[in-house]
Image (tube, grey):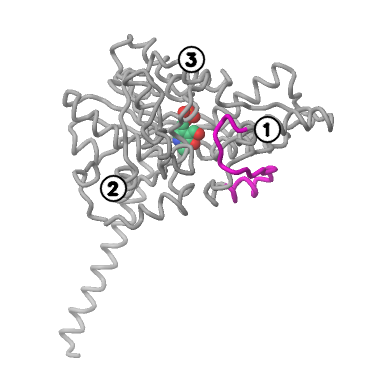
Amino acid sequence: MSERSLLHWQSAVAAICLGTAAFSAFSLWSLRKQLRDGEVPPAPAMGVEMLIGNTPLVQVRSLSRATGCTVYAKLELANPAGSAKDRVALNIVRAAEQQGLLVPGEPGWVFEGTSGSTGISIAMICNALGYRAHISLPDDTSPEKLALLESLGAVVNKVKPASIVDPDQYVNAAKKACERMVRDEGVRGVFADQFENDANWRVHYATTGPEIFQQTSGNIDCLVAGCGTGGTITGVARYLKERKGLWECHVVLADPQGSGFYNRVNHGVMYDSVEQEGTRRRHQVDTIVEGVGLNRITHNFRNGEQFVDEAVRVSDQQAVRMAKFLSVNDGLFVGSSTAVNAVAAVRMARELPKGATIVIIACDSGSRHLSKFWKEAKAVEREISLEEVMQ
Ligand SMILES: Cc1ncc(COP(=O)(O)O)c(C=O)c1O
């Protein structure tokens, strides 16, 4: 190499090094500035249960850009046990303590029938507060949720998927397990009963709703949420409509295929065509989506049904594609029910005036769904357009 080209080469290396150093310094400076300009970091929490709630609201930039509305996601997946169910589990335990069914500082059991998220939240809260968790669930629940429950040390009771009228259906199995252990073993215990328990919708009315109202400065035109127990949608909707007026915030239930809520909300009848004799498949609600969709009316839903204005049906294919779209375009790695909400939000954005603000609930993360839902979502091509998602 000639002396001249060696000099060129050395200056090029020096320029690259300088550039990299300047870039790192800039990144660090802007991170520090963000920290200085933002809120004061929260004070230390005295226990993990105190970290529940006050979840962030983030703009879904891709959907906002594409629709001309502002679409936000309420990141319930940022709760310590990873879903909105942390709020419910804590409130159910606190209500049981107030009723004397559990006594702080003394051994006690919380029983629940749940296909996943609520069980994980109950297991975490029981560990934090000194209780034990006993969770009954369908044996086809995703392996990552099962592994989480087992890792948290919950007693896991797997039952065959069945209709609610079957005494061995997972909710009925949980109730029976509670009655048996309280009667035969003399333990202190409570059946959480998230579907029928008022502590469920009330915590969303008292916390999730006010948080969304504050985070949007009251400028929310449309709320989109799914419905499993109905606690989230009815609790948040009731709060927002009380604050804003009945018609000032449109509340939309995003329903997966096979669920009866779509017809219940839009036509007053709890029915889906898969209910026809001879057409029902193995699962209660024929969808790959977990946590939302049902074919019975729960107390939590009935109690706030009047606050739900409309339901939008979302196919599994739309949800799977939307999950990939949000991951690739926004860095939002979400679970199946959040993807369902995002599809419904785009449908609403196309009907609402430009500039409207839509909030969707992002209930849990994609990492809870790796082996089922995300197995399909990861196969979706990276370049998929929003039009293709919505087909
Ligand atoms: C992942 C997920 N999303 C949404 C929901 C629905 O929430 P809710 O039960 O408040 O209707 C659930 C309920 O379990 C869930 O697990």
Q: Secondary structure at mark 1?
A: strand
Residue 250, percent across and down?
30, 19
Residue to which mark 1 is pinned: 111
Q: Is residue 11 left or right of residue 277?
A: left
Residue 157 within the segment the image draws in magenta? yes
Q: Residue visible at 40% across and 38% down?
A: 337
96 lies above or below 333: above
Residue to which mark 2 is pinned: 325
Question: Which circle's residue, 2 or 3, is located before the other in the chain?
Answer: 3
Residue 154, percent across and down?
68, 42
| Pair 2/3: label in front | 3
Q: Residues within 10 Å of mark 2 (few under 14, many from 20)?
A: many
Stretch of the chain drawn in magenta: 146-166
Would you identify the image quadrant in which residue 351 lies?
top left
Measure the C-alpha gap from mark 2 to mark 3.
Answer: 35 Å
Residue type beneath disc 2: Phe
